[in-house]
Image (spheres, coloured by chain):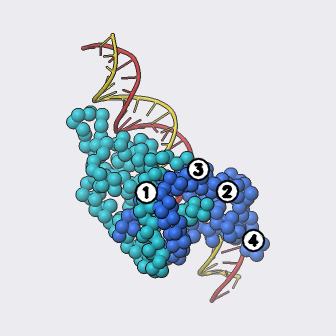
Chain colours: A cyan, B blue, C red, D yellow
Amino acid sequence: MAIAGGFERFYEVLRRLTPRSELSLTAASTLRRLERSGPHRLCELHAPEGVSQPAMTQLITRLEKEGLAARGSDPDDGRAVVVTITDAGRDAVARRREGRTRALSALLEQLPAEDHAAIVAALPALERLGDLMVEQPPA
Amino acid sequence: MAIAGGFERFYEVLRRLTPRSELSLTAASTLRRLERSGPHRLCELHAPEGVSQPAMTQLITRLEKEGLAARGSDPDDGRAVVVTITDAGRDAVARRREGRTRALSALLEQLPAEDHAAIVAALPALERLGDLMVEQPPA
DNA sequence: GGGACTTCCATAAGTTGGTGATATAAAAAT
DNA sequence: ATTTTTATATCACCAACTTATGGAAGTCCC
């Protein structure tokens, strides 16, 4: 399939759009999740982010150290750790989002209008493809 | 921009499509480059792959150890190291490509036909966006 | 209510793939 | 013939994972 080849290529390209920022991929994704859908227990975070539980523990420890997230407790369950995003965390997410958006916009503007339109038109489809992929662990 | 958000999402999704394989992202991308456009000197590889020169040296060392690439020399320049992909390397690239293709196809088939069409239609545009990104180091 | 599992999180130890600083040898320049 | 530049390699270090294991809080079950 040419589609797979195109995706492979696109993936590498996106990879380069990110790297040197203050947040790792998983860190950014986790913070965005916390911002979008509120506090979560640690065990609810690691699976959707696709990392092991110890990795999530360590990530939260890092985020806490940097002041971007906070550990809390659940009064009804002494085992649980409830992770919350802080204001500084929201700022970091916003900064990252803005930086990405600016870089992408600059590139998109140089693209022919019909390419631009094609990408916009495909976004909802890509979104749904993403949903499928989360539901069904791809081999 | 909604586009940036969509890409961010899509990136995370693609990330999950890759990891468990035998090759790291940079390794796969480098092998593909060697397959596509023939032998390269080490110094011609690290910049387009977006890693430092020591990282490329180490990557080539790993690939050599695994038999996927080979170091050669340039008779006209004693400093140069010329990297070539081996048959085993080609096999590895092919296997990876096939695995990805199968996983993606399985998902794409479940998507409504118009989503499928939208993605196919956007591929050339994404390709061109990728070209732009390589030319212009995004902030 | 007192064990026996179970769930949630943390810790330990090891691995991978990167980084910057620096060394070395070959080529180019002055 | 020096000096400078270029192409790799090596070194010490680090970030972010992994698996295996430990311990504490909850649940189940007579």
Residue plotted at (42% across, 49% down): A49
Label 3's element? loop
Q: Are marks 3 and 1 in contact (CB under 8 Å)?
A: no
Q: Nearer the viewer, residue A107 or B51?
A: A107
Task: Provide the chain ID for the residue under circle 1.
Answer: A
Residue plotted at (61% across, 60% down): A1
Around disc 4, counting alpha carbons within 10 Å, would you say few (fewer than 14), some (14 to 19), or many (20 or more)?
A: few
Tell whether A76 sits left or right of D29. left
Label 1's element? helix
Q: Which mark is residue B74?
A: 4
Q: Position of residue A105 (x, y in %)?
A: 40, 74
Label 2 or label 3, whichever lies nearer to me, is: 2
Residue behind mark 3: B21
Label 2's element? helix
Q: Nearer the viewer, residue B24 or B95?
A: B95
- The residue type indicated by label 1 comes to Arg
Label 4's element? strand
Q: Which mark is residue B94?
A: 2
The CA distance from mark 4 to mark 3 is: 33 Å
Residue behind mark 1: A128
